[in-house]
Amino acid sequence: MAVWAPVDDGEVIDVAARGVSGEGAEVQTEEIQALLDECAARPEGGVVHFSAGVWRTGPLRIGSRTTVHLAAGAVLKAADDPFLFESEFLLIG
């Protein structure tokens, strides 16, 4: 069984420590996306870490040099609003 451990605390962004709630009550796409973007903007990249909890979000973009780590018990849950997931490239015939 592999055990996850960050190589350097400076390379890890902990979403809970940055104020994002893992209680699953509200959709937090913008907050989570901002942390993913911050990680991707670092020259060395890094890890965005989700501790145990329910993290509700719409669609997310994961940039280069970015690893998403879900701890045991962590769930990324899609928002209930289907309009968040529409795409301008979606063709309905």
Image (tube, rainbow, N blue to C red):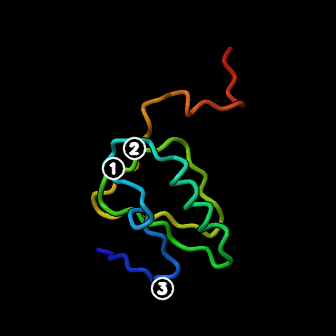
Picture quarter with the C terminus = top right
Work out which residue is located at the far front of the displayed protein and give it. 19
Residue in front for this viewpoint, 34 or 44 = 34
Q: Decide: few, some or many residues near mark 3? Use Cα within 10 Å; few <14, some 14-19, many ≥20.
A: few
Q: Residue at x 34, y 53 (%)?
A: 22
Residue in front for this viewpoint, 55 or 3 = 55
Which residue, given by chain and number where applicable, does mark 3 sit on?
A: 8
Identity, as a three-letter code, of the amino acid under mark 3: Asp
Q: Position of residue 17 (x, y in %)?
A: 40, 67
Which residue, given by chain and number where applicable, does mark 2 sit on?
A: 77
At mark 3, the secondary structure is: loop
Which residue, given by chain and number where applicable, does mark 1 sit on?
A: 54
> In this rendering, would 47 be left or right of 56?
right
Q: Is residue 9 above or below residue 53?
A: below
Identity, as a three-letter code, of the amino acid under mark 1: Val
CA separation in Å, label 1 and label 3? 25 Å
Are circles 2 and 1 on residues that touch, CB within 8 Å?
yes
> In this rendering, would 46 be left or right of 18?
right
Identity, as a three-letter code, of the amino acid under mark 2: Lys
Q: Position of residue 67 (x, y in %)?
A: 53, 67
Q: Residue at x 33, y 45 (%)?
A: 24
At mark 2, the secondary structure is: strand
Label located before the other in sequence (2 or 1) = 1
Q: Residue at x 38, y 80 (%)?
A: 5
Q: Decide: few, some or many residues near mark 1? Use Cα within 10 Å; few <14, some 14-19, many ≥20.
A: some
Q: Is residue 80 above or below residue 5?
A: above
Looking at the rendered structure, which numbered label has been put on residue 80? none
CA separation in Å, label 2 and label 1? 7 Å
> In this rendering, would 69 be left or right of 84?
left
Q: Is residue 93 above or below residue 8?
A: above
Q: Position of residue 57 (x, y in %)?
A: 47, 44
Label located before the other in sequence (1 or 3) = 3
